Amino acid sequence: MNDTLSTSDPTASRGTPAPAQGPDTLDAPAPFELLPGAAHSPVILHVPHSSRRVPAQVREGIVLDDEALERELDHITDAHTAELAAAAAESAQLTPWRFVNRLSRLVVDPERFPDEREEMLAVGMGAVYTRTTHRAPLRRADVDPRPLIDRCFHPYARAMTAAVADRLAATGRAVIVDVHSYPAARLPYELHGDGPRPPVCLGTDAFHTPPELVALAEKAFAGLGGVGIDSPFSGAYVPLRHYEREPDVTALMVEIRRDVYMSEPGGPAGPGFARVASALTALVDAVGR
């Protein structure tokens, strides 16, 4: 399993949510959102890492000062990916569904395993990070991750599982397109960053990513300067209920190198944004037929 591949456990118990106390709590605004698409679209654009939002009650457990936290958010956030997904949804012939994380991955990373199966624990970046992208302390090393996993991770997993099941019931299949970005230069936390860093990296899964899905993506993104497979990141997100059990759930991770469409590390979108949005729309149209 690579840096961005994980599956989520839909069977784990939910923690008891605290009452909402205002706009800066875990409960308000909503920590994730399912944005409906066309009734007959099998496509779910999954956007797990686009938000910079760290609620105050989570901020208290982070040891970085405000300036350092902003720098870390610049590096760790897949900036503008929610906007890319929105642009593709607006332009697509058949509107895809969108599942968007509204919390920063510094709260909880929904694409990690929540237990010892997660290889990123080796660099302090399991479901609840204790280290930064540059391997500096983010939280105390002895922090108990279970409250955040119960509060945020498991509800997210259940909701994504339900969204996939709904597409299966409605259309007979579900196509998860995981929308990510990654830096042009390797960051110290990356365990598998030695290989090529193409403008577009497609992450695949041996069971859930059929060759025809890869071929459609390669065609859709061909105009962005080059497409690579599983380097520097591999894998694709599939909920555990369907993982290696349901062949009608297919998945592909799309990693856009950030300098293709924005100013790094956390700057504004640039002229390349429209080209990436158009390419993502082409992929949605191709797989949604």
Image (cartoon, helix red, strand yellow):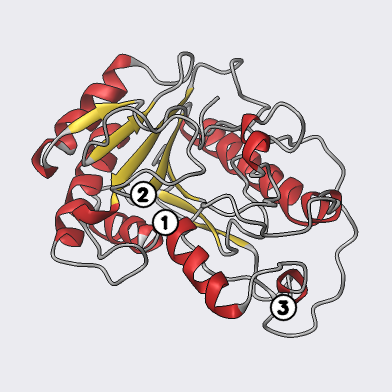
The residue indicated by pointer 2 is 181
Q: Front-most of 54 and 13?
A: 54
User: Do the residues under discs 1 and 2 have CB atoms within 8 angstroms?
Assistant: yes
Measured along the vertical axis of the image, is residue 277 above or below residue 200?
Answer: below
Relative placement, left or right, of 257 versus 130 is left
Q: Earlier in the sequence, mark 1 or mark 3?
A: 3
Among the two numbered marks 1 and 2 on one chain, the one whose residue lies closer to the N terminus? 1
Q: Which mark is residue 98?
A: none
Q: Position of residue 229 (x, y in %)?
A: 30, 25
Q: In this view of the protein, which residue sits in the foreground, 271 or 35? A: 271
Which type of secondary structure does the marked residue at label 2 adopt?
A: strand
Q: What label sits on residue 78 in the rendered view?
A: 1
Helix, strand or loop for disc 1: loop
Residue 3 picture location, percent across and down: 51, 35
- Amino acid at pointer 2: Ser
Q: Label 1 vs label 3: CA separation?
A: 21 Å
State the residue position of label 3. 56
Name the residue rendered at 34%, 51% in the picture. 95
The residue at the far right in this view is 16
- Location of residue 282 in the rendering, given as x and y in whole percent from the top left corner: 19, 43
